[in-house]
């Protein structure tokens, strides 16, 4: 089985197992997903969703972030960790979105990467979930499962994994594929004790114990 053939099979099996490919982060506005994803660095999605419920109520518009003293933002997001840096990035990103992008999150990778604290993982999430563009979000689950499934070999670099998957995946399926990998990585193919006996991908996984 070639990598391309395996990618097609994995895509189909994941779609059957997880028909609702949804982002775990809660948001209603484009910039709220941007900010929630920034807060998720070294923090669980569950914790981020708790924090953003208060954050989005406290600062309902971009102008509120841009005008707020940095200490006020820090106080709300403190339990997310790295709160000094994250608060600085949220405030600066809000100001840049207002001044450079008309208050909207941009729809191009190069523009997204100009925003403070935003890397390719977050940019791809925005492009996929907000704008419906082909996107590959290489978070820890995506990298781990891509290696176990033989879609990449001993590769930990997020950019290299992203580029490899772009060659293998149907562009129309790539964003949902990554969301489904997250669900599968949390529920079945966990980092320390994968539940291989209950895995829907066992039929095509080269790491499945014989």
Image (cartoon, rainbow, N blue to C red):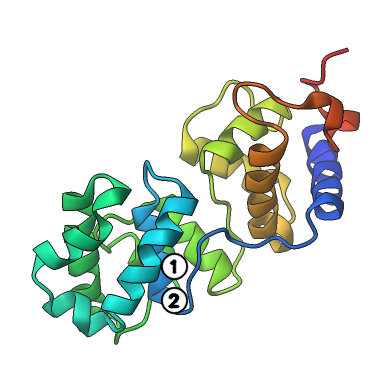
Residue on which the image places disc 1: 33
**Do the residues under discs 2 and 1 have CB atoms within 8 angstroms?**
yes
Residue 47's mark?
Answer: none
Classify 10 Å Cα crowding around label 2: few (below 14), some (14-19), many (20 and above): some
Left or right: 188, with 127 as reference point: right
The quadrant in which residue 76 appears is: bottom left
Left or right: 131, with 185 as reference point: left
Residue 68 location in percent, x, y?
Answer: 13, 75
Tell me if I can see residue 106 in this picture: no
Label 2 sits on a secondary structure element that is helix
Tell me if I can see residue 152 in this picture: yes
Name which residue lies at 60% across and 31% down: 144
Residue 114 location in percent, x, y?
Answer: 27, 62
Name which residue lies at 58% across and 38% down: 141
Name which residue lies at 78% across and 41% down: 7
For the C terminus, the image quarter is top right
Label 2 – label 1 distance at C-alpha: 6 Å
For the N terminus, the image quarter is top right
Label 1 sits on a secondary structure element that is helix
Residue on which the image places disc 2: 30
The quadrant in which residue 69 appears is: bottom left
**Residue 208, above or below 166:** above
Q: Seen from this angle, which residue lies furthest top?
A: 210
Residue 177 location in percent, x, y?
Answer: 70, 52
Name which residue lies at 91% across and 30% down: 203
Residue 86 location in percent, x, y?
Answer: 24, 54
**Residue 41, above or below 112:** above
């Amino acid at each position: 089985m070639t990598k391309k053939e395996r990618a097609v099979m994995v895509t189909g099996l994941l779609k059957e197992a997880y028909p609702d490919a949804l982002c775990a982060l809660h948001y209603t506005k484009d910039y709220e997903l941007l900010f929630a994803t920034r807060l998720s660095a070294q923090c669980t999605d569950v914790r981020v969703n708790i924090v953003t419920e208060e954050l989005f109520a406290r600062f309902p518009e971009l102008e509120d972030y841009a005008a707020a003293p940095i200490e006020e933002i820090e106080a709300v997001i403190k339990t997310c960790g790295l709160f000094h840096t994250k608060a600085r990035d949220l405030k600066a990103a809000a100001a840049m979105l207002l001044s450079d992008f008309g208050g909207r999150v941009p729809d191009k990778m190069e523009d997204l990467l100009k925003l403070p604290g935003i890397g390719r993982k977050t940019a791809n999430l925005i492009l996929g979930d907000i704008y419906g563009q082909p996107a590959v979000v290489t978070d820890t689950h995506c990298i781990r499962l891509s290696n176990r499934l033989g879609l990449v070999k001993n590769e930990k670099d997020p950019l290299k994994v992203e580029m490899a998957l772009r060659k293998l995946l149907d562009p129309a399926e790539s964003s949902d594929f990554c969301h489904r990998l997250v669900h599968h990585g949390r529920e079945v193919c966990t980092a320390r004790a994968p539940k291989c006996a209950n895995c829907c991908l066992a039929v095509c996984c080269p790491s499945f114990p014989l």
